Amino acid sequence: MKIDEQIQIIDKAICRHIDQFNVSGRGAVSQDILKNLRDLVEHIMLKIYAQGKDIDDNWDTIQTAIKYVKTRAEWRDMTRFHSYLQISVSHYLVDEENSERLMLKYYVFLLKLKNAMKNLFAFDTLANLDKFPLNTDATQQEYYTLFEL
C-alpha cells in the first residue's frame, strides 16, 4: 500500500472516532483515537522522508523515516510527539480517563501535524479535529496546570 493511502485510512478512522463523541463520550473516543496516533505520526514521518512522494509503506522505510525526521530540527515537535506516543500507547490500552488526559495534551501536536500536512503537501488530514471537545472540568484543568511539560 502506498503512503498516501495509508495516511488516508488512518485519518478516516480518527475522524470517524471524533464524530462519535456525542454517542461514546470523550473518554472512549480518546481511547479509540490513541490506538491510531502512532501509526499516523509514523506515516507522516515517512511522507516527510519521501519528500512528499508516494512511496511504499513497509517497516524498514518507516524506521528509516523516523531516524531521518529525528535528525531534523524543524521536526522537533513531531519527534517529541512520537516519543510520547511510544511511551504512552505503544503496547497497552490506556483507560478512558487517562486517554482523555493524553488527548488533551496531544491536541496541540495534532493541530501542528494537520497544519504541516496542509502547508507542505496540500494534504488534508484531521478535518474534524476542531470537533474534539477541549472543555475540561476544574479538576482536570488543575491536573494539567500542575503537570505541564
Image: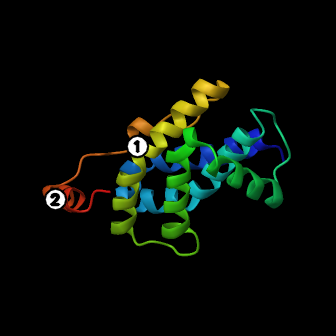
Q: Return the residue found at the far bottom.
A: 92
Question: In percent of the image, x 53 and y 35: which residue is there?
Answer: 114
Q: Return the residue found at the far left.
A: 138
Q: Position of residue 12 (x, y in %)?
A: 61, 43
User: In the figure, residue 121 lies in which quadrant?
Assistant: top right
User: In the figure, residue 117 lies in which quadrant?
Assistant: top right
Question: Does residue 76 lie above or below 92 as drawn?
Answer: above
Compute the Cα span from label 2 to label 1: 18 Å
Q: Amino acid at mark 2?
A: Glu
Left or right, 11 with reference to 134: right
Q: Kindly indicate whether the residue at mark 1 contacts the one at mark 2 (C-beta within 8 angstroms).
A: no
Q: Which residue is mark 1?
A: 108
Disc sitting over residue 35 in the figure? none
Q: Position of residue 53 (x, y in %)?
A: 80, 33
Q: Position of residue 32 (x, y in %)?
A: 50, 60
Q: For numbered disc 1, what is the local secondary structure?
A: helix
Q: Is residue 43 visible to the viewer in this orientation of the structure? A: yes
First in residue order: circle 2 vs circle 1: 1
Q: Is residue 25 visible to the viewer in this orientation of the structure? A: no
Q: Nearer the viewer, residue 3 or 26?
A: 3
Disc sitting over residue 142 in the figure? 2
What is the quadrant of the C terminus in the image?
A: bottom left
Q: Position of residue 106 (x, y in %)?
A: 42, 51
Question: In percent of the image, x 20 and y 56: which residue is there?
Answer: 145
Question: Does residue 87 lie above or below 142 as drawn?
Answer: below
Q: Nearer the viewer, residue 18 or 109?
A: 109
Q: Amino acid at mark 1?
A: Val
Q: For numbered disc 2, what is the local secondary structure?
A: helix
